[in-house]
Structure formats: C-alpha cells, structure tokens
Image: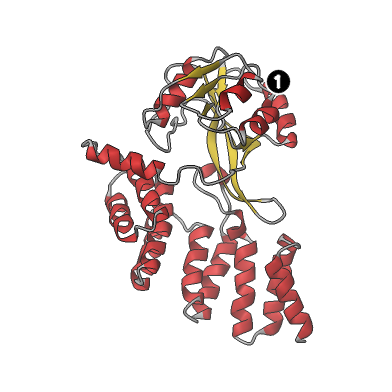
Amino acid sequence: MIVKNEEKTLERCLNSVCGVVDEIVIVDTGSSDRTMEIAAKFTEKVYQDPWRDDFAAARNFSFSKAHMEYCMWLDADDVLEPTEREKFLHLKQSLPPDTDMVMMKYNTSFDESDNPVFSYYRERLIRNVPQYRWAGEVHEVITPAGNILYSDISVSHRKNGPGDPDRNLRIYRGLIESGKELEPRQLYYYGRELYYHREYEEAVSVFRRFLDLPDGWVENKIEACSVCADCYYKLGKSDYALQTLLRSLSFDTPRAELCCDIGSHFLNRGDYQNAIYWYETALTRKRNDRIGGFVLPDCYDYIPLLQLCVCHDRLGEREKAKAYNEKAGFCKPYSKSYLYNKQYFDSNP
C-alpha cells in the first residue's frame, strides 16, 4: 500500500485483510495525521518515501519492500468484504503455481441496496518479479501479461471524501509543461480529468486527438466516445455528441453502455421509436466483464427496461410500459424509480 493522510479509512482497510495476507507493507508518502501510527498497529514494515508526483514510482517502491511470492495492492479506502475474504483464502490454497497475475473485480460505485453499479477488472495479485512493475505517473498500471487468472473475488472501493480533486490534473499538466508527450493511455485519462474539472472545450480537443490515434486500447476508445459526447452536450452541441457516440461503433460491436447513451439522446428529444431501438439493442448485448473496460451492469437490463417503460408510456402504449417496469422491478425491486412507476400505474389504471 501507498498512503498519505488516510487516518479515516486505513484501519478499516487493514482490518479487512488482516489474517488473510501473509505480509503487510505500507509506504507513507508524507502524512501529517495519524496514518503511520495506525499502520504500525498492523505491521512493522512501514516505510517513508517522499512524494514525487509519480504513483508508479511510489507503488514500485512499495513492491521493492515485499518478500512474498505475490504482491496484492490496495488503496486505503479499499475493503475486502467478509464474503471476499473467504474466497481469497480459498484462492491462496488453490492458485495454480504457474499463475503470474490474478485479475479481480474493482467495485467503485454502489446503489441504494449496496449492489455494485460500476466495476471493472484490475490486476490485483501480481507475481513479485522485476518484469511486473508499475508504469504511469497517474492512473498507474501493470500491463497484464503472462499466465493470467480471472477470479470472482471483488475489492470494494469505499471512498471517504473527495481527497485532492486537482492532483491528477496538476500532475498531467506538469508532465506536459516539462515537455513530455503523453502516451495514448495517458491522453485518454488526461481528457477525463479535464472533463471532471468541467473544462469541456479542452477535454473535447484531447479526446479527439486520442480517438484519431492509430493505437490506443479499444475499451479506452469506446469509453472516450461516451465522455467526449457528454462534453459536447455540456457545450450545447448535441449533433456532435451523437456523431461521437456513433463513432464508438467503428471500434467494436456495440456496448450496452453506449446503446443506452444513444437511446438517451433520442429519448431526450422525444424521438421515442429511435430510443426504443437502442434500448432494445442494449438488452441484446452480452455483458463481458473480462474484456477489461468499465462496466455499468445496469445498462444490460435495469436501465434499458426502465427507459423502455418511459418510451412506451409516452407513446400511449400503457400495457407495454407497465410490463417493462415490472421487468425492471425484477432486476431491482427496491428501486425508487421502479416503485414510483408502479404507484403511477396502480393509481392510474
């Protein structure tokens, strides 16, 4: 782990893995709170490493202090839930000896019943050898390689507060000012940081540069189309937004997430037939979490079903609308939107 001023979450994280892992290595990059005191309650292997605006360097320093055959990384606001602890203990007993990396789900957003609504696979357990080390000053990564095992174990990201919202953008701009040319993956994430900071014009420019590159990971390209389109909406350029969403189809077969984006475009403009087409298409897409991109599970059932309810209701097709709402409720019986619609249909027979 690399940490800085994490007194609010660190103990929760370490309690969730204590007794599951064989060694805990914590690198503090400049805390001014009780972080190091809390860390010392769990391990003697607490180190200090000055922060250099380089996440990869900090993580590689932490890996250099590890002595076990595999390294598992966590952030201070991550948690291994009790059910996942049991799976992890089983994995340790059953892991094939030739495994180089274990990919685990990273759940980063949750609905009102604490079910994940945003997740993706990350390289989580990595053989501790020199060829597997981190790269990238921001949004660092160890490129999956070797014998890779996909696990159903999930790590939950339970963020507590915004942290430093300007840090990543500051690092990217520092790299650019130093004369560094951003690699495709960095360009993609730079565009996302600009988007988060509502610098939509510049974000569009960066995303367009990224999308025009001959290289770059296809999942990043598809996701960039979605975020870039939202920038165009914010700028009042809905035609460009639709063109960008449709451009995603040039990179691979449609993702349900993009189908829902396109459906939303037509729904918001009262073009219900076109919206229905894209929401129905979303329902036909097969979810593939292992493809590596960001996954919004609700886009494969709940969201298109709920929106099809809206479309058919506005077309006066009440029974179809009611049926789609019931299907959405089957996915999420606790959903406020489903329950609101149900009351609407029950009170207006």
Quarter holding residue 335: bottom right
Which of the pair 24/170 is nearer the observer? 170
135 sits left or right of 3 in the view: left
Q: Secondary structure at mark 1?
A: helix
Q: Residue furthest left?
A: 179
Number of numbered discs? 1
Residue 106 % position (x, y): 58, 40
Residue 143 to residue 49: above or below: below
Residue positioned 68% across, 69% down in the render: 337
Q: Is residue 324 left or right of residue 280?
A: right
| Quadrant of the image occupied by residue 101 | top right
At 50% from the left edge and 70% from the top edge, which residue is drawn? 264
Residue in the picture at 27% in, 48% down = 213
Q: Is residue 304 visible?
A: yes
As drawn, 153 above or below 326: above
Q: Residues within 10 Å of mark 1 (few under 14, many from 20)?
A: few
- Where, by quadrant of the figure, is residue 245 drawn? bottom left
- Residue 315 placed where, x, y %? 59, 85
Q: Is residue 132 visible?
A: no
Q: The N terminus is located in which quarter?
A: top right
Relative to 261, say whether 319 is above or below: below
Q: Whole-percent x and y of residue 25?
A: 56, 19
Depicted 204 relative to depicted 11: above or below:
below
Q: Nearer the viewer, residue 4 or 273?
A: 4
The residue labelled by disc 1 is 93
Percent of width and height locating residue 160? 59, 43
What's the coloring here?
Answer: secondary structure
Q: Nearer the viewer, residue 349 or 60?
A: 60
Give me the residue at 62% from left, 35% from top. Answer: 9
Nearer to us in this view, 308 or 343: 343
For badge 1, the amino acid type reads Gln
Which image quadrant: the C terminus?
Answer: bottom right
